[in-house]
Amino acid sequence: MPNYQWDHIHLRSADPEATAQWFEKMLDAQVIRSMQQGKPRIDLKLGGQNVFIAPVGPSDKVNAPPVTPYQGLDHFGLAVSNVDAVVADLKKKGVEFTMEPNNPRPGIRICFMRGPQGISIELLDRDPKYT
């Protein structure tokens, strides 16, 4: 059986710079700027994961972002410690939360926030004694 490992998440954005700045400001992502095929490229490093941001131009045939919840890829999750303190800090920065912190079962506390282009991002605080 092949060994599958995560390589990247790929986002599309009409404003890659604003998207990158949001992830940098709100989630402390590292912004990586480079050139690819003679064009500027913006990538992120977030929680050890590669996040590629592809520009979407007015003439590109790309659908508008869906409104959550929807079928297909619904959200991505980031592990944090002390989710309540993290949420308080993000709210001060202006992040919109679609679900406040709660405990869906013993040993885990979660919440959801809205990122650029309506991206749904979950924050998870797992108690190690339940894993």
Image (cartoon, helix red, strand yellow):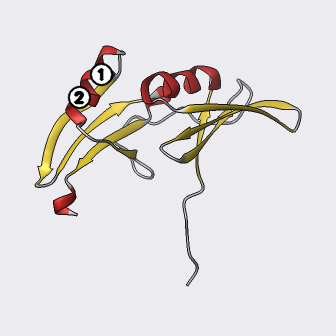
Q: Residues within 10 Å of mark 1 (few under 14, many from 20)?
A: few
Spot occupied by residue 130 in the image (x, y as percentages of width and height) = 17, 62
46 sits to left or right of 35: left
Q: Is mark 2 on a helix, strand or loop?
A: helix
Picture quadrant where residue 27 is located: top left
The residue at the far bottom in this view is 1
89 on left or right of 2: left
In-image side of 49 versus 26 (left or right): right
Mark 1 lies on residue: 89
Residue at left offset 87%, top offset 38%? 37
| Left-right relation of 38 to 115 | right
Residue 55 on image: x %, y %: 69, 30
Taking the view exactly as shown, the residue that stands out farthest to the right is 38
- Give the secondary structure at mark 1: helix
Q: Could you tell me the amino acid type at mark 1? A: Asp
Q: Are marks 2 and 1 in contact (CB under 8 Å)?
A: yes
In the rendered image, which quarter contains the C terminus? bottom left
Q: Is residue 102 above or below residue 21?
A: below
The quarter of the picture where the N terminus appears is bottom right
> Residue at image x 40%, y 34%?
67
Residue 70 location, quadrant: top left
Crowd around label 2: few <14 · some 14–19 · many ≥20 (10 Å): few
Query: Residue at 28% across / 27% down in the picture?
Result: 97
Question: Which percent across, then down, holds residue 107?
Answer: 15, 54
Rendered view: 71 above or below 111: below
* Residue to which mark 2 is pinned: 85
Residue 81: x, y in percent?
Answer: 27, 41
Foreground: 80 or 110?
A: 80
The amino acid type found where label 2 is placed reads Ala
Residue drawn at x 55%, y 70% as measured from the top left: 4
Q: Could you tell me how far apart the alpha carbons at marks 2 and 1 are, in whole angstroms? A: 6 Å
